[in-house]
Amino acid sequence: MNAMTTGMFAGLLLGVAAAAGGFGGFLVALGLGALGWLVAGQLAGELDLRAAVRGRERD
């Protein structure tokens, strides 16, 4: 398992633990899973979030 997958599972487990049940709990778990995936990808060097946030540079 790579770092991004581990981060995604950690976020999903935290989301389920934080808000068990219902559609709101599902959305929290999904959001935390995505956040964990992004952070783990940035730390592992597989994603470059700064390039995505920076956007296009103007002349």
Image (spheres, rainbow, N blue to C red):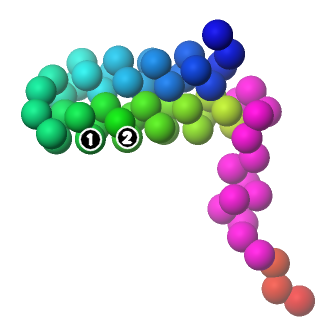
Q: Which residues are magenta?
A: 43-56
In the rendered image, the vertical position of residue 24 relative to residue 12, given as above or below: below
Q: CA distance from mark 2 to mark 1?
A: 6 Å
Residue 45 belongs to the span the image colors magenta: yes
Q: Secondary structure at mark 2?
A: helix
Q: Residue furthest bottom?
A: 59
Seen at 37% across and 40% down, the residue is 31
Residue 33 percent location from the top left of the image: 43, 31
Residue 21 percent location from the top left of the image: 12, 27
Q: Amino acid at mark 2?
A: Gly
Q: Which residue is mark 1?
A: 27
On the picture, is 30 further left or further right than 57? left
Q: Which label sits on residue 55?
A: none
Seen at 72% across and 66% down, the residue is 54
Q: Which residue is mark 2?
A: 31
Q: Are marks 2 and 1 in contact (CB under 8 Å)?
A: yes
On the picture, is 8 further left or further right than 57? left
Residue 24 belongs to the span the image colors magenta: no
